Image (cartoon, helix red, strand yellow):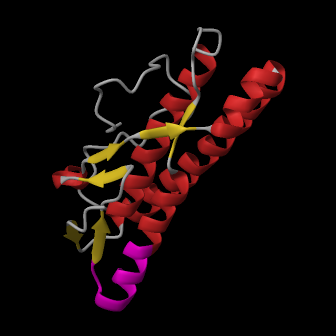
Amino acid sequence: MSMTGIVTDHIEELLHLIVRFTRARRRVLTDNVRRMNLAGFVPQDLAIQEFAEQLHGAIEEHRGHRRLMLRDNQHVRFGPNGRLDLSTETDDRAKGLLASDPPAYLEYQTQRLLENTLNERVALAMLRRHTRGVPRWRTQDLDLTRPYWPSRRWSLGDEKTDP
């Protein structure tokens, strides 16, 4: 695990990261639904617990030192200018459901998409509130008016995780 960190002085960055993470996760989850009938397909997800632990550590650092220290781990890496590099991991529960009960698998993926959408909405609402009155150049990299529902773009591929 890399201990390289990026220091920033603004809690706004965490909200941007949460929105980027939820949008990337939406693409992974919709891909799980779209590809479920392909032979050999294995459902994936992002490392939610690792991401949450990283954010918790960053918040603790902010509370103690008035800065955010974002540390990389196996599945989540932070880059310059707010870049977020994410890798997926096998979703064992979804894999089991897909093999044994496809309708339950679809319900499981739908619930995860709804949960993810709620997380995105909350982060966007907080970001809008936080950036009220902030010059546009500070928030121009994130479209705060973008719809919450899954887009027609399915694959993470080589895409950036930026919105």
Q: Quadrant of residue 158?
A: top left
Q: Is residue 104 magenta?
A: no
Q: Position of residue 132 (x, y in %)?
A: 38, 60
Q: Quadrant of residue 12?
A: bottom left
Magenta region, main secondary structure: helix
Q: Is residue 65 magenta?
A: yes
Q: Residue at x 59, y 24 (%)?
A: 32
The C terminus lies in quadrant: top left
Check the image and report above or below for 32 versus 129.
Answer: above
Q: Residue at x 42, y 66 (%)?
A: 54
Tell me the magenta residue range: 57-67
Nearer to me, 134 or 3: 3
How many labels, in total? Answer: 0
Nearer to me, 57 or 74: 74
Nearer to me, 20 or 88: 88
Q: Is residue 1 left or right of residue 18?
A: left
Q: Residue at x 67, y 45 (%)?
A: 115
The N terminus lies in quadrant: bottom left
Q: Is residue 12 left or right of residue 148?
A: left
Check the image and report above or below for 144 versus 134.
Answer: above
Residue 145 appears anywhere in the view: no
Q: Position of residue 133 (x, y in %)?
A: 33, 62
Q: Position of residue 71 (x, y in %)?
A: 30, 66
Q: Position of residue 25 (x, y in %)?
A: 50, 38
Q: Quadrant of residue 68?
A: bottom left
Q: Residue furthest left?
A: 80
Q: Residue furthest bottom?
A: 64
Residue 93 appears anywhere in the view: yes
